[in-house]
Image: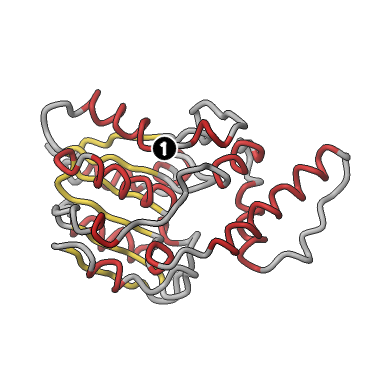
């Protein structure tokens, strides 16, 4: 029975992203041992408010897979920030991964939208300032993507100050094309055609064994719950 590590996106958690949708049950039914990870600042993990604490998000991923699968490489599925974290992990220790699904990332890996990230941070800070002043934040002046991220951050159980610190982390930089080429295991990029990171074809082409699955009529936050994502990922991991 192979092991699969699941890594959620920014503002999510193992329980809300993977368990609530039934995806973990589908993997288990397909004979997979699921390794769940809550990234620092999310879910049941500690939630520091210092951006420097988030310099290496891969630590919790490696802690989990080294504890539960110390002798064998694992398959891995990541969404958004989780996919970016898995990329960092696979570049650092490619021998630990046998197959990787990267969902909710695409052109943003190759062409980072630093201005967009700044607008999201400014939106989060506006909400934090409103909380401190005990007033309602004004989201009307934000662009659509920043507003969506801010609303996602306000889900029950989230610490918006921790999530803002994650966005301001010092290691949120670009990937070099040559770095991507060191990830030699099979890689599947899954992205919705309504996702702001679409398309994913060029990213997939940077891997020696990469392919892309484009989901029709699916936006960013809907990706990990889309039936097309389930089907493509389960088939790729041979869990059907």
- Way the structure is coloured: secondary structure
Residue at 24% across, 61% down: 188
Placement of the N terminus among the 4 image quadrants: top left
Q: Residue furthest top?
A: 67
How far from the left and from the top, in percent, is residue 110?
Answer: 38, 66
**Label 1: element kind:** loop
Q: Relative to 132, does residue 172 appear above or below in the rendering?
A: below
In the displayed structure image, the side of residue 11 where residue 80 appears, left or right: left
Residue at 58% across, 58% down: 117
How far from the left and from the top, in percent, is residue 120?
Answer: 63, 56
Q: Relative to 217, does residue 188 appear above or below in the rendering?
A: above
- Residue that mark 1 sits on: 57
How far from the left and from the top, in percent, is residue 66?
Answer: 23, 27
Placement of the C terminus among the 4 image quadrants: bottom left
In the displayed structure image, the side of residue 213 where residue 121 appears, left or right: right
Q: Relative to 133, does residue 227 appear above or below in the rendering?
A: below
Residue at 61% across, 56% down: 149
How far from the left and from the top, in percent, is residue 210?
Answer: 19, 64
In the displayed structure image, the side of residue 64 where residue 159 appears, left or right: right
Residue at 66% across, 46% down: 154
- Closer to the camera, 30 or 202? 202
- Closer to the camera, 219 or 72? 72
In the displayed structure image, the side of residue 84 where residue 164 appears, left or right: right
């Amino acid at each position: 029975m192979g092991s699969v590590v699941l890594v959620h996106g920014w503002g999510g958690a193992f329980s809300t992203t993977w368990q609530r949708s039934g995806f973990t049950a589908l993997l288990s039914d397909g004979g997979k041992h699921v390794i769940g990870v809550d990234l620092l600042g999310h879910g049941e993990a500690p939630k520091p408010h210092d951006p420097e604490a988030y310099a290496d998000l891969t630590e919790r991923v490696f802690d989990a897979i080294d504890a539960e699968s110390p002798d064998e490489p694992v398959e891995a599925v990541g969404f958004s920030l989780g996919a970016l974290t898995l990329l960092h992990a696979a570049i650092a220790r490619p021998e630990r991964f046998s197959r990787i699904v990267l969902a909710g990332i695409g052109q943003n890996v190759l062409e980072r939208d630093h201005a967009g990230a700044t607008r999201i941070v400014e939106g989060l800070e506006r909400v934090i300032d409103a909380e401190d002043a005990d007033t309602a934040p004004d989201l009307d002046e934000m662009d659509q993507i920043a507003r969506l991220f801010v609303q996602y951050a306000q889900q029950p159980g989230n610490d918006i100050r921790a999530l803002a610190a994650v966005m301001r982390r010092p290691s949120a930089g670009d990937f070099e094309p040559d770095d991507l080429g060191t990830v030699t295991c099979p890689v599947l990029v899954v992205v919705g055609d309504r996702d702001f990171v679409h398309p994913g074809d060029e990213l997939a082409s940077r891997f020696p064994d990469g392919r892309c699955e484009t989901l029709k009529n699916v936006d960013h936050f809907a990706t990990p719950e889309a039936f097309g994502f389930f089907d493509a990922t389960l088939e790729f991991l041979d869990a059907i």
